[in-house]
Amino acid sequence: MNKPEILVTRAVFPDVLERLARHFEVEANQSDRIFTEEELAQRLHGKAGVFTTPTERVTAHVIAANPRLKAICNMAVGYNNIDIDAAARAGVIVTNTPDVLNETTADFAWALLLATARRVTEAEHWLRAGKWDRWRFDTLLGADVHGSTLGIIGMGRIGQAIARRSTGFNMRVIYHNRSRLAPDLEAHANHAQYVSKEEVLRSADHIVLTLPYSPQSHHAIGAAELALMKRTATLVNIARGGIVDDAALIAALRAGRIAAAGLDVFENEPAFDPGFLSLSNVVLTPHIGSASEPTRRAMANCAADNLIAALTGGNPLNILTP
Ligand code: DGY
């Protein structure tokens, strides 16, 4: 019997490709170039499934152009790159890779939070530029993390993992989410207290964004929200570009309206507003929140498991489509 045909849109661990090749005729994108919407639509002709990453836009047009497509399996927990409604209408299964990246991404949120509050990258640039000639009482003073108030906007599993880590820093945790967590989950998340988004913005010393991107969360943090924050506060975004209005954030950082920001994601990444580069009070990283070797492997294997299950009569674990 002929194996179903699939497309793997970007480079991935070779052993994961080998696993997929045991079940499918695999077309792999050896060049690792990001396909345009039209190229993706064309490459998918005749394919039953596609292994995607956050860089591909699987639009209604791509889905409509490929009536034989049965499954879109994304190697990411976020899935704003896929038109879920169009997939559901066409009866195409969409899956993501939740859970396997919670702890690694929470670790990275803390790396950015600490680097931002304590000006770690700025200090390193300063040292490398030969500016360190003596100890001074006021060199690169930052904000304390221990004993401060941590605000989390978007209290899903990653937000809760970030909150759990705050116990060692003796922090108070406040959060906002679409809905309040069950009491046992709040207790487990360092007794996090549910408040309005405005209250998080007004009261937190360090704010971490972990909410998913959607039209509803587009520019959830803009000029008005930044104006509510303490002048001494820091903002960390490990979720998705587009949740923060980058132009408004640059203006706030430049004006000292907030102290600093740590950003792993950007509007229109990998392009980003060059205004960030001229600011010393921002830590910039290239969307590496989940980028540990074991976690990226787990994500790739999870997406592969979902694709194998979806196309061989099994039950994929992480179905997003109704
Ligand atoms: C995700 O899983 O959504 C991450 O952003 C990908 O690194």
Image (spheres, grey):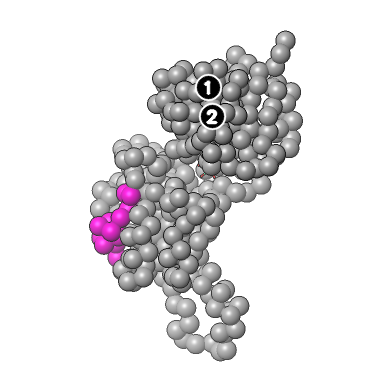
Q: Amino acid at mark 1?
A: Asn
Identify the magenta region: 219-230
Q: Is residue 118 left or right of residue 22?
A: left
225 within the magenta span: yes
Task: State the residue position of label 1.
Answer: 66
Labels 2 & 1 near each other (Cβ < 8 A): yes
Q: Is residue 99 above or below residue 259?
A: above
Asked whether 276 or 313 is in front, the reply is: 276
Mark 2 neighbour class, 10 Å CA radius: few under 14, some 14 to 19, many 20 or more: some
106 within the magenta span: no
Q: Secondary structure at mark 2?
A: helix
Could you tell me which residue is drawn at 56 percent across and 51 percent down? 288
Q: Quadrant of the N terminus?
A: top right
Report the residue that reaches farthest toward the top: 1
Q: Is residue 285 left or right of residue 279?
A: right
Could you tell me which residue is drawn at 49 percent across and 32 percent down? 58
Q: Amino acid at mark 2?
A: Ala
Task: State the residue position of label 2.
Answer: 41
Asked whether 169 or 202 is in front, the reply is: 202
Report the residue that reaches farthest toward the bottom: 134
Could you tell me which residue is drawn at 45 percent across and 40 percent down? 157
Of marks 2 and 1, which one's residue comes earlier in the chain? Answer: 2
Report x, y in % for residue 122.
51, 72
